[in-house]
Image: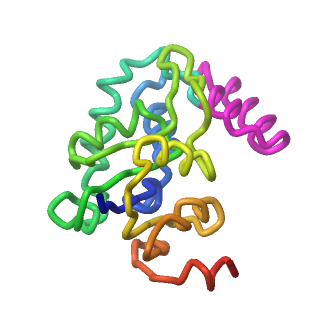
Amino acid sequence: MELDIYDFDKTMVPFDTGSLFCLWSFVHYPYIIVFAPYAAYGIIRFGLIEKNVAKMKKYAFGFIRSIPLEKAAVKFWNRYEKKVFDRCRKENRKRFSVVISASPDFLLEEIAKRLEFDCLICTKHNRKTGEITGRNCRCDEKVRRFKEQFPDAEVVDVYSDSLAHDKYIFSLGRRCFHVEKGGSLTEFSYSEMYKE
């Protein structure tokens, strides 16, 4: 089976979904401002000082227990679906497409339905606490989860904005495409880029 792999944030859309959703939620549900000190503490301590992304996300998304999450995700994508790059829409994708992202499942499931991704692999969260369940889906965890679901797949194209974090999924593809700011693509050789 041949397929393509897409990262999501800054690859299929020109923004970081989780960060934008946090800002959007504070505007649309202003009462969650009470969570701001909690979120700030987690972002500073675990994001900037301890570099523990899983713990940071627990604090950053702690507010989701207080909003109508499914409705919020629908409203969020009603506003931002138009920002999806045209090449990532179903009619422009070349083959079976797997989206692998560190972004939360509670955000990506809605856009996955709308864009008809063939498969979505992302970070799973407890929707009552915001806490990650399992491991954050980034770096080598993306490859582990992909191989668990598609042990015999042949990866043709890989698309991502992050040369540093997505070296792992780039290693799977026949062709690698770096998504530049603004959405333009640059094809590159994995062996030349990473000297392997």
Front residue of 32 and 115: 115
Answer left or right for 4 relative to 36.
Answer: left
Answer left or right for 26 relative to 163.
Answer: left
Q: In this view, does 170 lie above or below 39?
A: below
Mostly what secondary structure, the magenta segment?
A: helix
Residue appearing at x 56%, y 28% in the figure: 61
Answer left or right for 72 relative to 124.
Answer: left
Q: Where is the C terminus found, in terms of image quarters?
A: bottom right
Q: Is residue 29 above or below residue 167?
A: above
Q: Where is the N terminus found, in terms of image quarters?
A: bottom left
Residue appearing at x 50%, y 51% in the figure: 16
User: Which quarter of the picture shows residue 33?
Assistant: top right
| Number of marks present in the image shown | 0
Residue appearing at x 30%, y 62% in the figure: 2
Residue 72 picture location, percent across and down: 34, 28
Q: Which colour scheme is used?
A: rainbow
Please say whether residue 100 is one of the residues in the magenta stretch: no
Residue sticking out furthest to the right: 49
User: Which quarter of the picture shows residue 42?
Assistant: top right
Residue appearing at x 29%, y 24% in the figure: 71
Q: What stretch is highlighted in magenta?
A: 34-60
Residue sticking out furthest to the left: 91
Residue 38 picture location, percent across and down: 69, 23
Q: Is residue 177 above or below residue 63?
A: below
Residue 123 picture location, percent across and down: 51, 36
